[in-house]
Image (spheres, rainbow, N blue to C red):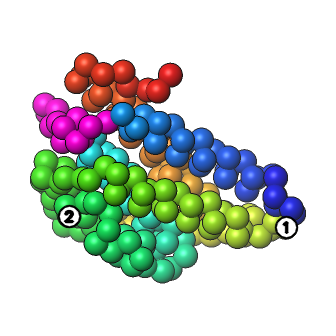
Amino acid sequence: MANGENRVISHIRAQMKSAHWLLEETISDVSDEMARFAPPGKALSIGAAYVHYVTSEDWMVHSLFKGVAPLMGGAWAGRTGVSDPPPGPGDDWATRFEAWCRRVRVDLPAFRAYAKAVYEATDAYLATLPAALPDAELSREVDLSAMGMGKKTVGFVLDNALLGHAYCHCGEISAIKGVQGKKGYPF
């Protein structure tokens, strides 16, 4: 635990590091061909799932929590290795997202560097939460109406849209690796 850091914040930081570790280890042996493989039905390709999760984390931490531009549109603009960013919320999002999933291409080494920057930015944000009063930030409401979820707390978003989301997509990536005859999780 960092000097003066609250145990709750320390635990959240450790959970995020663990989720990032598992996602990165699961993706570590994915080739470009594997990342592009389009599974039947509506399942995401590995590349689309990975890009979707990391860009979502970037947006949530920077835009939603901090009120600044995400790394993808700022310091990392044009350097993420993604052919085109995922569609934002709005009318017909599901149809636009499905089309994006089928066309997106990702340069995995470039994207992994961007992902590392996103993970570091998430940890830096969490490290800034006040040691004495982390509840003030964790209980602050953010507006997710554009995604059909109304107002939720920062704590809810951390638990569900960051941690839960990471593990869900990690499982999805692992399954799609298995469909391609590869070992899914790194263990």
Which residue is pictured at 56% across the width and 55% down the height? Answer: 158
- Side of 55 where 47 appears, left or right: left
Which residue is pictured at 47% across the width and 36% down the height? Answer: 25
Identify the element where label 2 is drawn. Answer: loop
Identify the element where label 1 is drawn. Answer: loop
Which residue is pictured at 54% across the width and 41% down the height? Answer: 21
Residue 137 visible in image = yes
- Identify the magenta region: 30-44
Q: Residue 69, image x and y in percent?
A: 43, 79
Residue 44 visible in image = no
Verify whether residue 183 appears in magenta. no
Which residue is pictured at 41% across the width and 61% down the height? Answer: 114
Q: In which quarter of the image is residue 126?
A: bottom right
In the image, 93 versus 113, the foreground residue is 113
Q: Mark 2 points at which residue?
A: 84
Residue 170, above or below 140: above
**Amino acid type of the residue that numbered disc 1 sits on in the rendered structure:** Ala
Q: In which quarter of the image is residue 121?
A: bottom right
